[in-house]
Image (tube, helix red, strand yellow):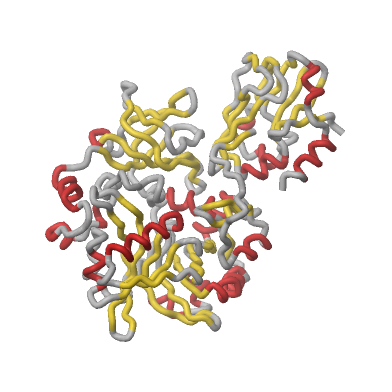
Amino acid sequence: MAAAGDTPPDGELLKTPLYDLHVARGARMVPFAGYAMPVQYPDGIIAEHKHTRAAAGLFDVSHMGQAFLRGDDVLAAFETLVPGDIAGLAVGRTRYTLLLNESGGIRDDLMATRIVENGADALFLVVNAACKDADFAHIAGALAGRAELEILPDRALIALQGPQAEAVLAEHAPACRDLVFLSGAEMTLGSAGAFVTRSGYTGEDGYEIAIPGDAASAFAEALLSDARVAPVGLGARDSLRLEAGLCLYGHDIDTATTPVEAGLSWTVGKRRREEGGFPGADTILGQLADGAPRKRVGLLPEGRAPVREGAVIRDGEGNAIGAVTSGGFAPSLERPIAMGYVATALSAPGTAVEIEIRNRTVAAEVAAMPFVEPGYKRA
Amino acid sequence: MADRKYTEDHEWVEVDGDAGVIGISEYAQEQLGDVVFVELPEVGKVLDRGDEVAVVESVKAAAEVYAPVGGEVLEVNEDLNGDPSLVNSDPFGDGWFAKLKLSDPDELDELMDEDTYKKFIEGLS
């Protein structure tokens, strides 16, 4: 038996502050973005996935990059790197945005929260683990002299996701009830100061909790002592975000995909569309006006066999029209689902396509995303 | 106790006369995690030892299963089409994949017996 994508364990892997907790709970640890991370616990991916949708899952996302960006005109400065309306963010609000390159490709996707420190504006950034070194070098370099980046390597990040997340966290920090989706505030958790945002990447209501590394394990154990909470690994994190139609960087989006192609046009703020002034603006504004040649779509393959990243998508005549970028089994729907890019002319939901699996093809239908309705608390 | 023989790739074969039932081991199903689909071979297909006999799809990834011995496929486990999780819950029993008519019983001598395989997987962690 041989599994595709097996990676040999690496002796040099970094550990998050929750490493011992994962091992003690029987997690299978795998290398991910240079860290030893739990892919699943003994319950398995399907059970962890369903528990998150039904109650609350605890995820260690401490491998992600956290930083503060400060400067007199930090909001305007950061806007030179991303297409989001950052200046228009209210204090305490969080925005999903994209670091772009000069051709309009996506260097990374990230969360930015506007905060105020001693009366001055600042941004709290959370970026992908695999991109963090490059992102931080890019941000610090591009904004040198205008804004200062403080990287926070000693902080853990714990995501608590699911319909019971609010009730669980409120026992430690009642103020978490006051946050709406995509907003954040400082809170005291146990004896530690933490920054809590109502956000996540599972399609569920929930929180991401940035907490000092030396306090993370005790707080995670306190959450896990609640019967409503189960630890959830990267395997279920992936199946949850796929059901929610959310992009995984390096798979569904990369430096060769633009926000318009990726179905992320909504991240280009209204004012930014009028003013431009972000990397690749000519390409992106052109695609917003005239359309992009290809689009990211959801895919529902017939039958039980999952289609995987890299599988060629064909039209009814057998012409290649794109490829799958994420594919797997959806535990909530008990069927395979996928996303990928197809020629824009064939991107309407309901379009019949074929996807290659090994030596055959399966029929599939272009589908609207998300596959599972999100549970965000917007108000 | 069944006379089960193992490969280093965690397939097993259990011989009864000139036929052998094949599957994957407890260790293999644990490593794979939740199995959601098994692509089985066609009955009548003739396999050489080491040929791909099935593909197991877990939530995360696909894994190929290789024939521990050569032979003609006599029967496949159709129950896996309805409930692929049998591979997880009963890998040495109801989670079997296929039954082969052995083309060369001497190939069995190349495989590990139960004790040798146990020591082999202990050495993997």
User: Which residue: 61% across, 67% down?
Assistant: A227
Above-or-below relation of A198 to A345: below
Q: Quadrant of residue A41?
A: bottom right
> In the picture provided, is A299 more to the left or to the right than B42?
left
Res. A290 in view: yes
User: Which residue: 82% across, 17% down?
Assistant: B17
Res. A50 in view: no
Point out residue B26 in the picture as x, y percentages from the top left corner: 72, 41
> In the picture provided, is B28 more to the left or to the right than A289?
right
For this orientation, the residue located farthest to the bottom is A118
Point out residue A32 in the picture as x, y percentages from the top left corner: 53, 52
Q: Quadrant of residue B58?
A: top right
Point out residue A137 in the picture as x, y percentages from the top left corner: 36, 61
Of residue A72 and residue B60, the one placed in the foreground of this image is A72
> In the picture provided, is B58 more to the left or to the right than A74?
right
User: Which residue: 33% across, 27% down?
Assistant: A320
Above-or-below relation of A88 to B101: below
Of residue A176 and residue A131, the one placed in the foreground of this image is A131
Above-or-below relation of B27 to A266: above
User: Which residue: 23% across, 34% down?
Assistant: A345
Q: Quadrant of residue A18?
A: bottom right
Task: Classify the position of the N terminus of chain B by image quarter.
Answer: top right
